[in-house]
């Protein structure tokens, strides 16, 4: 069974896995085969853990790294009844962003366990992107300790690239709905300059009708702003908004957008994040 990239329940009943072309045989070595109890698998190094979500970093025999993420919904049989699982939505989101030319983590497998339409477990496998860290980790461990010129260059690159990606998504009426810094990967070159950006984890991504796009814009920009409040100045945040808006947007309209973002953030105020200097070695 192959990945469809459609925002819908994968099937009505049963335990099924779906693979990208060429990946079914590769993933057999870690136990991902049709009919297996993948909801119980403990693979490689656990990188995140919560009551219902676990993610693992797994190295295949050929040295390639993949990430296996699993959601367990036992006890909530009707939450995703006949609705797409978070992993199916994530595959859909990756598909939509890839169509728009936005760099993403490539999904290679997807699984759902359903009983008569009710979802009990879901999983997704994505290819690792070598030599990258999350924008969140970059901000906490590196940003504040960079020389002023490097910091200025990093902000210019990040601001321009993320702004361009969001504009591209939003013009196509697609919204990430989880555009936090932890869901953006960056790569640095040997001179500590950023040379690439990738988007990951979009289990709520969707396309909106034109009349709802303003809500999606505020939501995505608010998610992006949560950590920006800790690491960027007010003028830097405003410069980003001016760059995001088109040339016909007035200063008043930009400030109104900033006010809507602030109001959205006040519903669940972000906690302040402190920079941490890594110890040598």
Image: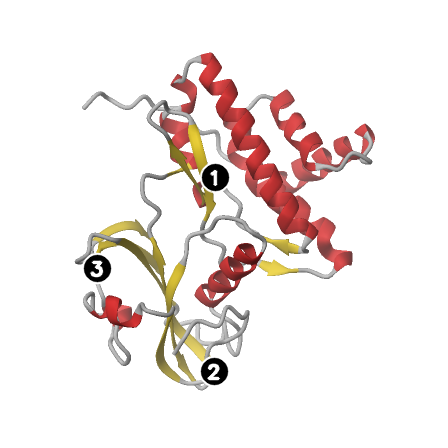
Left or right for 85, reference 245: left
Q: What residue did someone put label 3 on?
A: 43
Q: Is residue 162 above or below residue 56?
A: above
Question: Residue 181: which numbered mark, if any?
Answer: 1
Q: Residue at x 41, y 57 (%)?
A: 106
- In the structure shown, which secondary structural element does the residue marked by tag 2 occupy? loop
**Is residue 104 positioned above or below 242 on the image?**
below
Q: Quadrant of the N terminus?
A: bottom left
Q: CA distance from mark 1 to mark 3?
A: 26 Å
Is residue 56 visible in the rendered image? The answer is no
**Res 25 → quadrant:** bottom left
On the picture, is 36 further left or further right than 3?
Answer: left
- Mark in front: 2 vs 3: 3
Crowding at mark 2 (Cα within 10 Å: few <14, some 14-19, many 20+): some
Q: Position of residue 210 (x, y in %)?
A: 76, 58
Q: Quadrant of residue 218?
A: top right
Element class at badge 3: loop
Q: Earlier in the sequence, mark 1 or mark 3?
A: 3
User: Where does residue 177 sit, x and y in percent of width and height?
Assistant: 57, 52
Give the label on residue 117, or none: 2
């Amino acid at each position: 069974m192959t990945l469809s990239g459609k925002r819908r329940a994968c099937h009505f009943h049963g335990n099924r896995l779906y693979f990208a072309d060429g990946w079914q045989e590769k993933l057999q070595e870690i136990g991902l085969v049709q009919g297996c109890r993948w909801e119980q698998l403990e693979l490689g190094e656990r990188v995140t853990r919560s009551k219902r979500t676990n993610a693992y970093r797994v190295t295949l025999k050929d040295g390639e790294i993949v990430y296996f993420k699993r959601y367990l919904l036992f006890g909530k049989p009707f939450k995703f009844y006949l609705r797409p699982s978070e992993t199916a939505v994530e595959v859909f989101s990756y598909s939509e962003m890839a169509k728009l030319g936005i760099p993403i983590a490539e999904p290679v497998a997807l699984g759902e366990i359903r009983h008569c339409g009710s979802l009990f477990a879901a999983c997704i496998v994505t290819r690792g992107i070598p030599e990258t860290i999350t924008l969140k980790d970059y901000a906490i461990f590196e940003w504040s300790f960079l020389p002023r010129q490097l910091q200025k260059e990093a902000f210019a690159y990040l601001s321009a690239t993320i702004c361009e990606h969001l504009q591209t998504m939003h013009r196509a009426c697609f919204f990430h709905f989880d555009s936090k810094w932890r869901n953006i990967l960056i790569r640095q070159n040997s001179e500590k300059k950023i040379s690439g950006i990738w988007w990951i984890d979009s289990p709520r991504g969707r396309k909106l009708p034109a009349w709802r796009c303003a809500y999606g814009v505020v939501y995505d920009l608010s998610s992006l702003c949560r950590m920006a409040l800790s690491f960027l100045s007010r003028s830097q945040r405003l410069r980003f908004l001016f760059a995001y808006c088109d040339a016909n947007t007035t200063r008043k309209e930009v400030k109104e957008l900033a006010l809507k973002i602030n109001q959205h953030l006040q519903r669940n105020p972000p906690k302040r994040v402190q920079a941490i200097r890594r110890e040598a070695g």
